[in-house]
Amino acid sequence: MELTPVLRSEWLKIRTLRSLPGALLALFAATTAFSAIAGVSETSGPGFDPLFTSLSGVVPGQIAAVSFGAMAVSSEFQSGALRLSLAAVPRRGRWFAAKAAVIAVPALLVGLVTALAALLVARAALGPAADGLRTGEQVRGVVGCGVYLMLMALFAAGLAALLRSGVATLSLLIPFILVVSFVIGDATGTVADFLPDKAGQLVLRETYDGTLGPWSGLAVTALWAAAALLAGAWSLRRRDA
């Protein structure tokens, strides 16, 4: 079976399941709102990073990206939907690749639009405090932010395929992103630089210290996402629908 019809079928599922476009809308709204709040409340001082402040809404906003990836996959494990999908596409690897693609593309596009909106809104709120930002840094931040959000959505999608549950995936990832990652970072130093969220968020910073840089940090997040997708694909092949 050709890949194009499979992609169309999976894209139709993304469009028609209300919670999925809703998650992308929440990603845009939450990220932009929190970045605007950060811009209004932030004052320049020691350690002030205008680029990260402008894009800091991604930290809470990424929960919506994670939810999008997890729900897009976990919906297949409800009411026997996966059996129907695999009856139409017997080659499980091809089906899962199409599922990953239709998660990645909208997550990337919405992530790029969201990052640009957040940057513009926060810069307006920061005023002269953001004047030192160079064009190249802002482009890197916006592009990197879009890629980061896509990778986190794929990371969640892979875990959802492995765990076969959106609730289990979100129960694991949301506390990790919001709490555990910061605690581990304080306790373990440079080891935390290689966690999926901490590594990827380096691309959002104007200045950075440590082992990784913006793009190498994003590459680490990509490795986490690839590992999760491979684990999910393995689970899909080994376990009954």
Image (cartoon, rainbow, N blue to C red):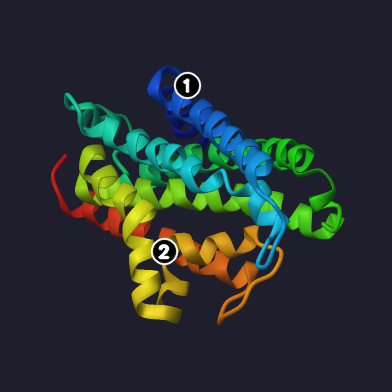
- Give the class, few, some or many, for how many residues have Cα within 10 Å of label 2's Cα (few <14, many ≥20): many
**Amino acid on which disc 1 is placed:** Arg
Which corner quadrant of the image does residue 176 belong to? bottom left
The residue closer to the viewer here, 57 or 232, is 57
Give the amino acid type for the residue marked by disc 2 in the picture.
Trp
Q: Is residue 122 left or right of residue 229?
A: right
Label 1 residue SS: helix
Q: Residue 15 carries which label?
A: 1
What residue would you read off at disc 2?
224
Number of other residues with Cα within 10 Å of mark 1, as a class: few under 14, some 14 to 19, many 20 or more: few
Residue shown at 34% from the left, 40% from the top: 70
Provide residue 195's location: percent of width, then percent of height: 41, 67
- Label 2 to label 1, Cα distance in Å? 27 Å
Residue 63 disc label:
none
Residue 128 position in % (x across, y down):
85, 48
Q: Which residue is drawn at 45% across and 80% down?
A: 190
The image quadrant that residue 118 belongs to is top right
Q: Which one is in front, 232 or 205? A: 205
What x and y, as percent, mark residue 13? Answer: 41, 24
Residue located 82% across and 57% down the image = 133
The residue lying at 31 percent from left, 29 percent from top is 88
Cβ atoms under marks 2 and 1 closer than 8 Å: no
Mark 2 element type: helix
Quarter of the image that includes the C terminus: top left
* Left or right placement of residue 43 versus residue 72 in this view: right
Quarter the N terminus occupies: top left
Please identify, in this view, whether the residue under mark 2 or under mark 1 is nearer the observer. Answer: 2
